[in-house]
Amino acid sequence: MSHHRPVTPPDPLSPPLSDPSNFSLILGGPLYQLWSRAHLGDIEAHIRRRILVLSGICWLPLLLLCGWDGSLLQGVAVPFLLDVETHVRFLICVSLLVFAELVVHQRIRGIVSQFIERGLISPLSLPRFHDAIRSAMIWRNSIPAEVGLILLVLSMGYFIRTHTFVLESSTWYATMEGGSPTLTLPGFWFFWVSNPIIQFLLLRWLYRLLIWTRFLWQVSRIPLSLMPTHPDRNCGLGFLGGSAYAYSPLLTALGAQLAGFIANRIFYDAAVLTAYKPEIILLAGFGLLLVLAPLTVFAPHILEAKRLGLREYGALAAAYSRSFEHRWLRTADRDGESLLGASDIQSLADLGTAYAVIKEVRPMPFSRDMFLQLVLATVVPFLPLLLTLFSFETLLDRLVGVIF
């Protein structure tokens, strides 16, 4: 006698995992399940509460512990309330990292859907496209992945933190004794709770970008029905540039974190902003690589569509131009039609416009303006640090001189 395990029927109201409308890099994983159990699963409705909870866990205990041991405004060379880096990391960076989830969730889903809406995926290739979505969502929901990130932060993070973020002088989180730092009571929360949280958030964003890159690479292996005459100059793939804009808050968070680090070195270790030019340039380049490199996987498709379009429309233009010249220049037989207002002229112009569009096709689905805006999003947190080099009046005079 065989026993059959009862099968729970699927929920007809929930979209399948491979549905483009169900694509999200955000709504999955153990932390998301934790948010859901805390009744904060709706990212659009609960984004402010998520920011308050995470920033509160990172920053508020430090405030209370420093008040208890007397290092809020005195007692050490760098008291808590004057530690710019700490406030930037746990109040600004954490907020931006959480806010970026809302922006990416709203934009990326629509971008994935456009592959279908624009007819770029043929009916025969739809199963492969749905498989790519399903695979991305499985990676997003991976429990071992997030557990691995947590273990990485806890195992390797202490060495990185104690050798990177500790100043040369005594601070509210570590005192210098014999040239080596000794953690204070607030310092233990700082190094074992607050910093691991923000580092986990950063690593999880890198993991999400890995998922996004892998998904785009899988889609780029699918035969696409590109349109060389599409006005976006990317054969119909120009919408992918919106994904780069979605990651702007993440780039700003990275810039703010480095800006806070530099600010502390300027205020307490007598450093100079210009000494950190290589780090700032490297960060800007790294940020561009993070968000733009995944889009380059479609360059071969776009260039192939451009070559094919130039060949086909070139042949069409040659045949039409030859017929046009024969009718209007070589013979007098025009079927009684007047040259003024003739449709042949308009058709010739339209054909020339289509060929010009194909010649202007760009292999990368992003523009120079997008490139500059992403750089600006990364470096804008460093602008206040210019006041350490010039007075406000000097900066204002230079800005007026540039504008006018």
Image: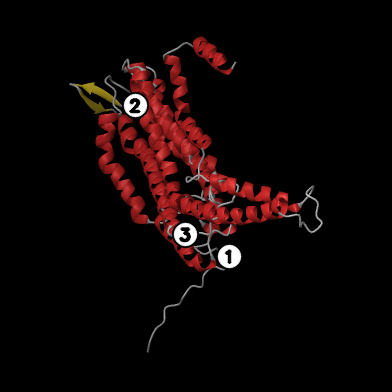
| Residue sitting at the far front | 331
- Residue 21 vertical placement versus 259 (above, below): below
Q: How far apart are marks 1 and 3 (CA)?
A: 19 Å
Q: Residue at x 63, y 54 (%)?
A: 322
Front residue of 213 and 363: 363
- For the image, the number of numbered tags is 3
Where does residue 318 sit, x and y in percent of width and height? 59, 54
| Residue sitting at the far bottom | 1
Where does residue 124 sit, x and y in percent of width and height? 51, 68
- Residue 2 vertical placement versus 240 (above, below): below
- Residue 120 vertical placement versus 359 (above, below): below
Helix, strand or loop under label 3: helix
Q: Earlier in the sequence, mark 2 or mark 1?
A: 1
Mark 3 and mark 2 residues within 8 Å of each other at the beta carbon: no
Front residue of 90 and 164: 164
In the image, is 243 to the left or to the right of 333? left
- Which marked residue is nearer to the observer: mark 2 or mark 1? 2
Mark 2 and mark 1 residues within 8 Å of each other at the beta carbon: no
Where does residue 22 sit, x and y in percent of width and height? 53, 58
Question: Which residue is under mark 3?
Answer: 133
In the image, is 264 to the left or to the right of 356? left
